[in-house]
């Protein structure tokens, strides 16, 4: 725990229980109240400097701070609403309010960016002299120092409670440091070289704000649409399940994100078909309990029996794995069954096909079946194509 998070946690009740929605809301409240206070002070300071110097870029930077204060207010409301417990209408909780608040902040940033761009272009077309002084540079210097502090403050707390909203605020503060530094640099150059750069720098700041807003929209829309979980999380779930004795493999992992700390998942767990069903059911119960208590993940594990002692099925599985690996190393199979008939044998299985495979499902089935028949003419493949719901497949 860093110095910043250590100091803040001491002033928050049960500050170590960061998985608790109420505790997360307290951290969010602390960060956003700090942001509102700092951004309003910076707004009035820069606005005064912009009006005195008649600088559109400094005024644009001031308006940017005002939008940051508005963003903090919306984010504060998002944390408050997200901490509400689940109810009959929302059984998965209200965690996605945090994503919605971040989306509203991003939209406000985009609107501000467009308005600043229009004002700056007008300044380029109709330029007027900028009158900078010592006070202007003092205010800009203080602004850079304050934004640096806010960047580190929000980043450390955001990492502690795994908040995309606070991490986005930290990135926005970093962007403000760059933008304000650019404004100060243009003022110095204009003063020394008698070159009018104010309108051009205003355009640059506006574009910078628009890019930042677009990036925030993309980052907040993804979890609302249902983006795939990170490869690190998928690998962690896979490795942890396989660490249990008696587990042979996993597949069909699906993870749903209903907001920070509100993840639900389902997975098929392969166990030996010869094993006692009560014992394997107990293993799955322990897996589900482990993930809930230690990862905050509500996991439902489906028992999937696999015939491990039948040498013929093992040979067919090995053959299929060899064939699909020759076809593509990204493919995998599961739920293999063998049904013998009078003239042929049905090889029934599911094949997981990632989205980067460009062939159609029909072409994939046909090619795998053709390669199997070239080895064993009496084998008839009955294939169900699955698509992965995670970032990587196993």
Image (cartoon, rainbow, N blue to C red):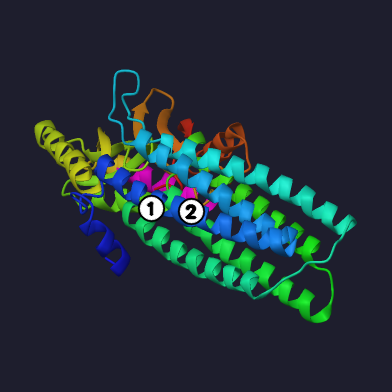
Crowd class of label 1 (few under 14; some 14 to 19; many from 20; radius 10 Å): many
136 w.r.t. 308: above or below? below
Residue at the spot 75% in from the left edge and 64% down from the top edge:
201
Q: Quadrant of residue 250?
A: top left
Which numbered disc flags the more N-terminal residue, 2 or 1? 1
Crowd class of label 2 (few under 14; some 14 to 19; many from 20; radius 10 Å): many
Q: Secondary structure at mark 2?
A: helix
Magenta span has 317?
Answer: yes
Read off the magenta span. 314-326
Relative image position of residue 63 (x, y in whole percent): 63, 51
Q: Residue furthest bottom?
A: 192
Residue at the spot 39% in from the left edge and 22% down from the top edge:
342
Instruction: Mark 2 and mark 1 in contact? Answer it, CB < 8 Å.
Output: yes
26 horizontally vs 252: left or right:
left
Looking at the image, which is closer to me, 27 or 123?
123
Identify the mark at residue 284; answer none if there is no mark: none
257 horizontally vs 205: left or right:
left
Relative image position of residue 391 (x, y in whole percent): 46, 47
Query: Which residue is the site of mark 2?
Result: 169
Image quarter in which the N terminus is found: bottom left
90 horizontally vs 273: left or right:
right
198 w.r.t. 357: above or below? below
Looking at the image, which is closer to me, 283 or 276?
283
Q: Secondary structure at mark 1?
A: helix
The rendered magenta stretch, by its main secondary structure, is classed as helix
392 w.r.t. 278: above or below? below
């Amino acid at each position: 725990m860093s110095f910043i998070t250590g100091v803040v946690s001491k002033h928050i009740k049960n500050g170590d229980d960061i998985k608790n929605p109420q505790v997360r809301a307290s951290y969010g409240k602390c960060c956003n109240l700090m942001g509102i206070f700092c951004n309003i002070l910076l707004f009035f300071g820069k606005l005064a400097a912009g009006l005195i110097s008649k600088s559109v870029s400094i005024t644009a930077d001031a308006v940017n701070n005002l939008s940051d204060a508005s963003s903090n207010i919306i984010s504060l409301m998002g944390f408050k609403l997200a901490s509400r417990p689940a109810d009959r209408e929302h059984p998965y909780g209200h965690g996605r309010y945090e994503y919605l608040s971040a989306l509203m902040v991003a939209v406000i940033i985009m609107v501000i960016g467009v308005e600043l761009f229009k004002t700056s272009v007008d300044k380029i077309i109709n330029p007027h002299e900028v009158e900078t002084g010592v006070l202007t540079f003092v205010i800009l210097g203080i602004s850079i120092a304050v934004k640096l502090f806010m960047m580190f403050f929000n980043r450390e707390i955001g990492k502690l409670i795994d908040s995309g909203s606070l991490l986005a605020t930290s990135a926005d503060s970093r962007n403000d440091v760059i933008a304000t530094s650019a404004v100060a640099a243009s003022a110095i150059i204009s003063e020394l070289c008698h070159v009018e750069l104010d309108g051009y720098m205003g355009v640059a700041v506006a574009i910078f704000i628009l890019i930042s807003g677009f990036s925030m929209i993309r980052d907040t829309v993804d979890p609302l649409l249902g983006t795939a979980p990170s490869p690190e999380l998928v690998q962690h779930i896979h490795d942890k399940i396989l660490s249990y004795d008696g587990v042979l493999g996993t597949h069909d992992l699906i993870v749903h994100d209903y907001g920070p700390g509100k993840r639900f998942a389902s997975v098929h767990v392969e166990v030996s078909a010869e094993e006692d069903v009560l014992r394997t059911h107990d293993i799955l119960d322990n897996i589900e309990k482990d993930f809930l208590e230690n990862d905050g993940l509500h996991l439902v594990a489906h028992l999937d029996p696999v015939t491990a002692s039948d040498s013929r099925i093992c040979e067919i599985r090995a053959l299929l794995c060899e064939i699909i690996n020759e076809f593509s190393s990204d493919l995998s199979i599961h739920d293999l069954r063998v049904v013998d008939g009078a003239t042929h044998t049905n090889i029934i299985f599911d094949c997981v096909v990632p989205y980067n495979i460009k062939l159609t499902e029909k072409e994939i089935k046909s090619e795998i079946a053709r390669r199997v028949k070239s080895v064993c003419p009496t084998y008839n493949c009955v294939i169900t194509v699955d698509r992965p719901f995670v970032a990587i497949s196993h």
